[in-house]
Amino acid sequence: MADTKDLEETGNKFTQVLDAAAKLPGVRINRAAYLRSALKRYCTAEQIEIAVAESPAAAGVPLSVITQVANTSIGYETSKVTGLSAVAGIPGGLAMLGTVPADLAQYMGHMLRITQKLAYLYSWPDLFAEDEELDEATESMLILFVGVMFGIQIAQSGVAKVAGMIAANVAKKLPQKALTKGVIYPVVKKVAGYIGTNMTKKIFAGGVAKAIPIVGAVLSGGLTLGTFLPMSKRLQKHLASLELTKPGHRGEDAATIDQEFEDEPTPGGSEESQPASARIEAAQLDEA
């Protein structure tokens, strides 16, 4: 049975890793610049401008094009993170970033990079306000995205809920209150705890790999390749299934995002092991 305090502690540890990674150079993706670069080979100039101003779905970019571009971005980030992980696997290859291992921080940095790229391709609004630090709503959304990458079911339900709220309200920003209070926030906290537990296992596995002379770099790189690629594909598949990807998906008469979810009751449920509690939380979230 998972203990609430243990989940909070591991969740806080994961949040520290996420915050450290978000501050690394090159982690934050400029939405407009990325969409222009990624779509220029496949779309007209008019389509691209609509995709930047609104979304690729609103611009009528075919899902086949989005899939192709997404696969290219996943391949690029996978090759980069695998190479860096192999370097980090060499003793003395990278120094520690405070209490966060450097290879773990760079691994998470590439997870955040591919998360942003996939989100923008699949018609999500800008995750970062210009020239601003990582705010609580963005942090919560990134936690949910990474949770999907780890295969956590309640994270999938949380992302679907937020996507529905954005689609219904023609929103060009994340729903601040829904992600920091009400029905979504308790889900974010649980997802962070589950991710923290998974990352603790990864740190142990990485430490064992590096303890083996010479082959440590190979094992570290192989561990990264075996996790980063399928995790990225899992997020891609989930984002592609959401209403945001479909042209004409947005309603015009929906209530405002923040007001609709500000006073929602928080989900209950047991504190059992992740798979069981995840199913319970997902059901409660869908009923909210």
Image: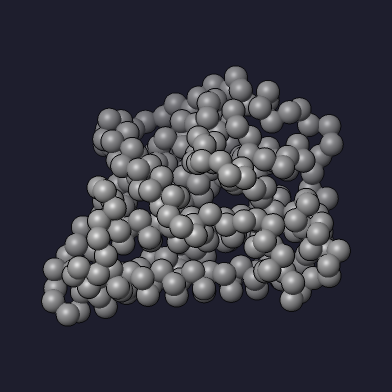
The quadrant of the image that shows the N terminus is top left
Q: Nearer the viewer, residue 157 or 227?
A: 227
Q: Who's the residue at 51% across and 50% down the image? A: 145
Residue 207 screen position, x and y as percent: 19, 62
Q: Nearer the viewer, residue 53 or 10?
A: 53
Tell me, yes or no, if residue 226 can be seen here: no
Q: Nearer the viewer, residue 134 or 206?
A: 134
The quadrant of the image that shows the C terminus is top right
Residue 157 screen position, x and y as percent: 55, 43
Q: Quadrant of residue 121?
A: bottom right
Q: Residue furthest top?
A: 263
The number of numbered discs placed on residues in the rendered structure image is 0
Way the structure is coloured: one colour
As drawn, 273 above or below 242: above
Position of residue 168 in the picture relative to residue 119 (left or right): right
Residue 71 screen position, x and y as percent: 58, 72
Residue 20 screen position, x and y as percent: 38, 48
Position of residue 270 in the picture relative to residue 114 (left or right): left
Q: Who's the residue at 49% across and 63% down the image? A: 232
Q: Residue furthest front?
A: 131
Position of residue 86 in the picture relative to residue 137 (left or right): left
Tell me, yes or no, if residue 105 can be seen here: yes
Q: Who's the residue at 41% across and 45% down the image? A: 19
Q: Who's the residue at 68% across and 23% down the image? A: 259
